[in-house]
Amino acid sequence: MSDLEGKVVIITGVGRPRGVGRAAALRYAEKGAKLVLADLGSSDNAIGDIEGTSPDLDRVAAEVADAGGDAIAVAIDVSKEADVKRLIEQAVDKYGRIDSMVANAAILAGKGDPLDISLETFMRIQEVNVAGVFLCLRESVRQMRAQGGGGSIVTVGSRASRRGDANIAAYSASKFSVLGLTQSFAMAYAKDGIRINCVCPGAVDTEMYVRQTNDFAAREGVDFETAKKQMGDVIPLGRLTSGDDVAKAIIWFTSDETSHVTGQAFNVNGGSWMN
Ligand SMILES: NC(=O)c1ccc[n+]([C@@H]2O[C@H](COP(=O)([O-])OP(=O)(O)OC[C@H]3O[C@@H](n4cnc5c(N)ncnc54)[C@H](O)[C@@H]3O)[C@@H](O)[C@H]2O)c1
């Protein structure tokens, strides 16, 4: 029996078909976890020059149920305090406690010359990627401390948590912050038996990465699939990372296999950089 059997796991950002969140939800379901799945649940949330997303929260929840999993779906915006509080409340109402939180939701926007990033775009990226993770950490730690018995939280960083990039300055700032929050919360609540680690993916072949692939295809004059292959060829393990590759690392960090690990950042990138 998996040590995740019966554990209550909240995952944010599950609503996209190839995304990390959905892959994690399906893997946790396989292991018998009870899931609380969160995403925007709306297709009209464009702000400034940030594209609206098209999350399909209910479809993913139905997929988990079809696979025999136990799950509820909660539509929230992770950057809103009341929404994140409601997420925890609904999880506790349904399952009585929470054992893990996977703070995965994020937006990639403001790409290109840093001088062209509007303040509105910069701030929205920090609201979702930094304040969203902060709220998920704070509210889940409050609940875990109140119920006792510890817990495990995974944040999702990026290569951009470790190294600046000329084309994604605002996103990189937000992902460095995710690491700062991870280490600070890990230090503060280790005494409560709450472990907090960060998974840092490289180039993951999800909807978030489609535009990068399209840009590369246009630059090289090749089609989308060829672009993906060429981008994968330069990664030492020979392909782009999949959502499922990242999901497996997330699961590992919430399992007993990492019972003495906290405050760490772990790259899942096919070896494309090493630190
Ligand atoms: N795709 C990559 O190449 C890559 C690389 C490094 C890190 N990451 C990180 O991995 C994680 C998952 O990314 P992905 O590639 O699966 O992206 P994705 O865009 O497929 O999924 C992100 C999900 O977050 C949701 N979301 C966005 N804003 C939200 C909000 N305010 N409230 C609630 N939900 C919200 C979206 O609707 C979407 O379903 C993110 O933290 C991302 O930054 C991705």
Image: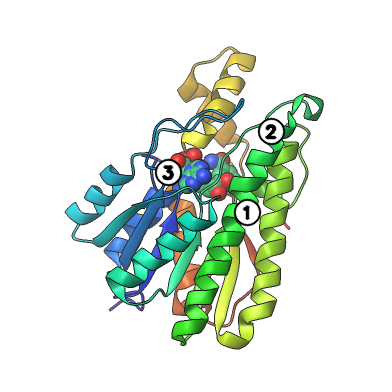
Separation (CA) of disc 1 from disc 3 = 15 Å
Closest to the observer, 126 or 165 = 126
In this view, 74 is above or below 259: above
Is 112 on the left-hand or right-hand side of 18?
Answer: right
Q: Residue at x 54, y 56 (%)?
A: 81
Residue furthest right as drawn: 115
Q: Position of residue 29 (x, y in %)?
A: 29, 62
If you read the primary sequence from the N terminus, does the residue marked by circle 2 or circle 3 appear first?
3
Query: Can you identify the residue that label 3 sits on?
Result: 40
Q: Is residue 3 above or below residue 163?
A: below
* Image position of 70 with respect to 219: above or below: below
Report the side of 36 relative to 165 (left or right). Answer: left
Q: Amino acid at mark 3?
A: Leu
Indicate the secondary structure of the residue bearing disc 3: loop
Query: In which quadrant is the N terminus drawn?
Result: bottom left
N-term-proximal mark, 1 vs 2: 2
How many numbered marks are there?
3
Residue 158 in view here:
yes
Q: Mark 1, residues whose alpha carbon is within 10 Å: few (<14), some, or many (≥20)?
A: many
Q: Which mark is residue 120?
A: 2
Label 1, secondary structure: give it: helix
**Can you say whether 199 is above or below 153 in the image?**
above
- Asked if residue 157 shows in the view, the reply is no
Per the image, the residue denoted by label 1 is 131
Of the 4 image quadrants, the one containing the C terminus is: bottom right
Instruction: Give the secondary structure at mark 2.
Output: helix
